Image (cartoon, helix red, strand yellow):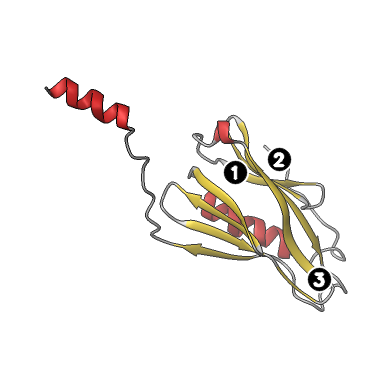
Amino acid sequence: MYPAETLDKYEDDGTMPDNLAEFSREVVGHRIITAEQTGRGILITLDNAKRVRLSDGGDCCAYTEVNDFLLHADRIEHVITGVGTTDGFTTWHIYADMGDVLEMSVGWSCGNPFYYAYGFTITVEPDVIVLSESPSRAELETEEMDRG
């Protein structure tokens, strides 16, 4: 859906495409249950009960951070089919067949080229229990009336 971006060899040493590929491996084929900004990054809970954390990273003048994100709640029922970027890896698009499910605004710089570390630290926290919504009182009363 989004063409692969190519950066000049003086802008990036492959860190940003590597981050994109690693993140894609974790989220493609799943649905987003929740997305929340943390103190230093974003935490995404998926339908497979795993949480994918993109933690801001950097050293000195080199950095990578999630500035903001927009979750399209009307599209979260759709399975993620890909992840792409635009604007020099500053906008990340997590998309499904109906369009973007999640958009992230990302700030980044390699700083003094390739002397300092930058890029996201991507971690997966497995086996999170995702509880379904409990039935409402009205649903329970209706069910009880149907039995009685």
Residue 72 visible somewhere in the drawing: yes
Residue 130 position in % (x across, y down)? 39, 50
Residue at image point 88% right, 74% down: 112
User: Which amino acid is tagged 1?
Assistant: Gly
Q: Is residue 123 left or right of residue 40?
A: left
Of mark 1 and mark 2, the one earlier in the sequence is 2
Dividing the picture into quarters, in which one does residue 144 lie? Answer: top left
Dividing the picture into quarters, in which one does residue 2 lie? Answer: top right
What SS does tag 1 mark? strand
State the residue position of label 2.
2
Q: CA distance from mark 1 to mark 2?
A: 9 Å
Residue at image point 80% right, 64% down: 12
Residue 74 position in % (x across, y down)? 57, 31
State the residue position of label 1.
82
Residue 47 position in % (x across, y down)? 43, 46
State the residue position of label 3.
62
Contact? badges 1 and 2 (CB < 8 Å) = yes
User: Which amino acid is tagged 3?
Assistant: Ala
**Looking at the image, which is closer to me, 146 or 103?**
146
User: Which amino acid is tagged 2?
Assistant: Tyr
Within 10 Å of disc 1 (Cα), the crowding (few <14, some 14-19, many 20+) is some
Q: Is residue 63 left or right of residue 71?
A: right
